[in-house]
Amino acid sequence: AVHGSRFEEFLKRAMLHAAPVNSPADVAWFLASYAREARARVEGQALPALDSLRMALEKALGITFEGSRGNHFFRSTLVQTLFYGVFSAWVLWHQANPARRDTFDWRSAAWELHVPMLQALFAQLAMPQHLKPLRLAEVLSLAGALLNRVERERFFANFEEAYAVQYFYEPFLEAFDPELRKALGVWYTPPEIVRYQVERVDQVLRDELGLPDGLADERVYILDPACGTGAYLVEVLKRIGTTLAEQGEEGLIGATLKQAVQSRVFGFELLPAPFVVAHLQLGLLLQRLGAPLDEEQERAGVYLTNSLTGWKAGAEQGQSEFPELDAEGAAANSIKRDAPILVVLGNPPYNAFAGVSPQEEKGLVRPYKEGLIDVWGIKKFNLDELYVRFFGLAERRIAEMTGMGVVSYISNFSYLSEPSFVVMRQRLLAGFDKLWFDNLNGDSRETGKRTPEGLPDPSVFSTEYNREGIRKGTAICLLVRKAQRAPLPQVYYREFWGTRKKQELLESLTRPNLEEQYDFVAPVVENRLVFRATDVTDQYLEWPLLSDLAAVVLNGLMEKRGGALFAIDPAALERRMRLYYDRTVDWETLDALDTGLTKDAAGFEARKVRPKVQAAEPFQQERLCRYALRPFDTRYCYYSDVSPLWNRSRPPLWEQFWEGNSFLISRPKGVASPEGIPFSFTRVLGDNDFLRGHAYYIPLLLRRVSLAGPVFQSLNLAGDSPATANLSEPARRYLGALGIADIDADPDSALLLWLHALAIGYSPAYLAEHEDGIRMDWPRIPLPAHRDLLLDSAALGQRVAALLDTERALPGVTTGSIEPALRPLAVIARAGGGALDPNAGHLTLTAGWGYPSGSGVMPGRGDARPRDYSTAEREAIAASAATLGLSEEEALARLGSHTYDIYLNDLAHWRNIPATVWGYTIGGYQVLKKWLSYRDERVLGRSLTIDEAQEVREIARRLTALLLLTPALDINYVRIKAETWTWAV
């Protein structure tokens, strides 16, 4: 396939050989194509001649090019630098004399690159003894010939008008090496974002720090610590130029900007390729202003260095074989330690190259972890994303070193509210006086890239050249620290949604009273100092977290094997696993099944894992278990705790999976929007992603604990001990105060609190009143002040649990005499009437409900047709409503004013699924639509069975019964809220 792609590109280049080349986009494609050819020649080749350069770069930048990824990164970096060096040299060659008629010689490119570091790097890479063994001279000659074909006058007319980077960095890297681009988090920052950040920084320098010239003030030293191609630095210079022009300056603007870019406007960059482009952009800007840098004596203040190291004295790397690299590092370290940086701004990278992790870098994150466990009770956290280190750098530089200044970053928005970042928020509040946050949303996980109204909400990084943008939601922070500290920090927050976010950001700059566009936020300890504007009542914060009620809370299983360890059909799963365990079955036979068991993954070398598993245990029939994959989507799994067959096998969860036990499911934080109900219930093993945001399983009872660990040891349970209640000491004291004693001997009493939690969690009134509070943490549960209230609530919770329990039939709902409102629901029918023939494919899902995507399944649009209820359907609803003490109108308010027919294909459909039932969402998953997405023919590979087609009816009936129960659940919640026990830990 690789050779085929190279051949196709060769043919395309050959066919276009005589075509005119005059647009930046065309040149970028050709250069990327030649660069891909160069990379293909370099991959797999030994590079002993470049070992000294490799070691020097590792030493200077604090990275290691280890393993296959490291080798790929190093080779890709070399090729990028060669091609960007040639391109930059060609641009500078043209700018030196636009009317010239001689031809450009790529071999002399080093002469055109005026920065000593660039000259040395390019010269090393372009040495004949390095290029010839790799057969790169031929490819570079072809690239040089391409550049000599360019109609330069037309090309540079377009090139000057556009942002050079739009054509010559992100799109180039996307075409050249898309996987590396994704791995490094290389995203071109849209010009609207860059301009907005620079303008806001300029404003607060004037308004908050008393510097009336803003960025133009010579006392303002600016650093972009991840400058990439220099977009922020260029915009800073433009802002300074605008200020000078507004003050009446004219002839010396270019000279002043040249002085600034050499002495107080700095950028650091780790990757050589964007480093080349940054110097090119800044050089072109100054040249256009009539103040070009002197090629012998002057350079822009952009340095090839690791921004996250070298800030403390004594961190020098020593001498290398390349004096230019040593000089570059020394100059960068001098700026880090001595320059009075007043502004830190930019777009920090989202991911790190795997080799980047020296101790000094880790030290930037360490303060954000202090107290997470012992003070805040957060035992699981993830602060490894690279942008967090850049916050640590900015905080240290401004708050600790300069003592005053401004920070403006656009980054992942997770730090605004996620529990893991509470100490980081605490330090930002302590280190800065005024903090503004522009939440730009656009997150695929939290909102599905949809506005609250359901309209598209793309990433702000979505551009004409990168329509997808990035998956993560983003936010812009603006942090100000004054020399005279304020007694309390002030926090301001606002949100942007939809397709015009970038334009709206810029428009907000021109409106009066900018600060009034924000909500004032008062972060408090009770909500973990979140920066988002929230509506959380004091009463809610007094209630215990769900996790506070349990002695043990367990993670769900994590497979990461492409679904190979679970299946809808238990017989198919059994056959697959018997083959896997059978030593007489060769690898090729197993590999032909095309499952994740024979595919390498993170921490999983497939060929090595199989013999390890076979040596540890035989196939065991009893390990074929029911498995809760998603709400109401229960399958079968094969369980083994031999690591790493499962990515995370969770032995403690397996220990508590036994006949008679069950689990309440919830999550530590809401990540989906809409999330729907953040609770569920099951009797079986369950998946880590049963709810979006990681599902946690609370065993209602505990026994048979054979694993070590302080939590389990403290319970003092023997291997054959009788079941005991999974309740914390404060929860036990609460029940004791209500006169409910000896809960370990009485299973019914042991379950009361958990059934009560289910009743509260399924109350729409509770969910609506406390939406913000529920989203930010574990849900908080009000405890009834009286025994009778608790017993009544638990009885309702028992009904909720029964409706959620896929392992037990439910009289009146799924078996026996079905309740009137449920009887006509989700009736499988043929369009136009008549019988359906499963053997003729009539139950095949071809209406576009789902499709395979990478390692998962994506839901499709499907075919859901809304309509009014028929007379018979309304009469059935009215009959059931009457038995529940509801009017027909009250029942319809819960079920929806209309219904849907859900089509499998052009012929068959499920008739009458009420609107609210169809939209019912648990843990971020629209239950029925998610179920259907996994059964689309493109995913399942077959038609539905009769039982599977009827399963949709069963799910619809259970969900309808849940909705008809909600009036009682709301009344129960309101009663308890009025008489709540005062929780004390």
Image (cartoon, helix red, strand yellow):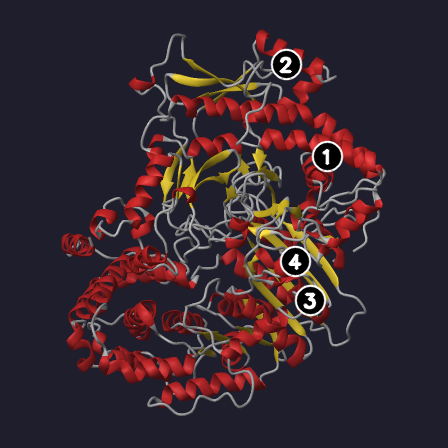
Kindly report the distance in space between the C-alpha atoms of the residues bearing marks 3 and 4. Answer: 23 Å
Badge 1 amino acid: Ala
Helix or strand or loop: what does disc 4 sit on? Answer: loop
Residue visible at 24% across and 59% down? 33
Disc 2 versus disc 4: nearer the observer: 4
Residue reaching furthest bottom? 319
Helix or strand or loop: what does disc 2 sit on? Answer: helix
Kindly report the distance in space between the C-alpha atoms of the residues bearing marks 3 and 1. Answer: 33 Å
Front residue of this view, candidates 875 and 716: 716
Q: Residues within 10 Å of mark 4 (few under 14, many from 20)?
A: few
Badge 3 amino acid: Asp
Mark closer to the chain start, 2 or 4: 4
Instruction: Please say whether residue 605 is visible from this viewpoint.
Output: yes
Kindly report the distance in space between the C-alpha atoms of the residues bearing marks 1 and 4. Answer: 28 Å
Front residue of this view, candidates 329 and 309: 309
Badge 4 amino acid: Asn
Disc 3 versus disc 4: nearer the observer: 4
Disc 3 versus disc 2: nearer the observer: 3
Residue reaching furthest front? 720
